[in-house]
Image: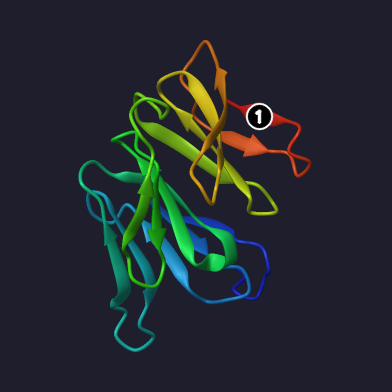
Amino acid sequence: MNLHSHLPTNAWLNVGECVTVRGGHSTILLGGEHPFTSSVGRQQKTGESVLVIKGPQGRINRAVWGPLNTTIVSAGEDAVIRIWDSETGKLLKESDKETGHKKTVTSLSKSIDGSHFITGSLDKSAKLWDIRSLTLIKTYVTERPVNAVAMSPLLDHVCND
């Protein structure tokens, strides 16, 4: 991993354990260590988590840094998108059942400018969201469950698998 890059770097440690490194920093976001838990950072000497974020149920499948690295956006088995304060671990917002996904969220990808993110789900849809307000912008319906999503830097194209 390149800890000095200005772009987030993702790596997989073990099955279900995603690591996202904050661009330009050495703070690491680990997901999937325990049911619905993400750890933010590690003490250099002890290896202890600096902050642990816990949700109500299921497992976090994906997590990305929000604008200015002040928030964390997470999604997982319970189909709810959550935005957390990255300093305190406090839950700030979560998607509602009406507009959100109906089944497990399998993928989450942030736009290059950090203003939007897209999620993919087993409910056969991909959804485009505003990252600050957690407002649903558009739903893309597919014929099969969505396993992966990606966004064009121009925001005109969305790709899902």
Residue 154 image point, x, y percent: 79, 41
Residue 82 image point, x, y percent: 38, 47
Badge 1 marks a residue whose secondary structure is strand
Q: Residue furthest right?
A: 154
Reply above or below: 114 against 139.
below
Image quarter in which the C terminus is found: top right
Q: Amino acid at mark 1?
A: Cys
In-image side of 66 versus 15 (left or right): right
Q: Residue furthest top?
A: 143
Q: What color scheme is it?
A: rainbow
Q: Residue furthest bottom?
A: 45
Residue at image location 67% in from the left, 30% down from the top: 158
Q: Is residue 15 visible?
A: no
Reply above or below: 134 against 123.
below
Q: Is residue 81 visible?
A: yes
Residue at image location 49% in from the left, 67% down from the top: 70
Residue at image location 61% in from the left, 68% down from the top: 23
In-image side of 59 versus 87 (left or right): left
> How many dots with numbers?
1
Residue at image location 38% in from the left, 58% down from the top: 84
Residue 157 image point, x, y percent: 73, 31
Reply above or below: 9 against 25.
above
Quick one: 132 or 38, which is closer to the camera? 132
Badge 1: residue crowd in 10 Å (few <14, some 14–19, many ≥20): few
Mark 1 highlights which residue? 159
Image quarter in which the N terminus is found: bottom right
In-image side of 11 versus 53 (left or right): right
The quadrant where residue 72 appears: bottom left
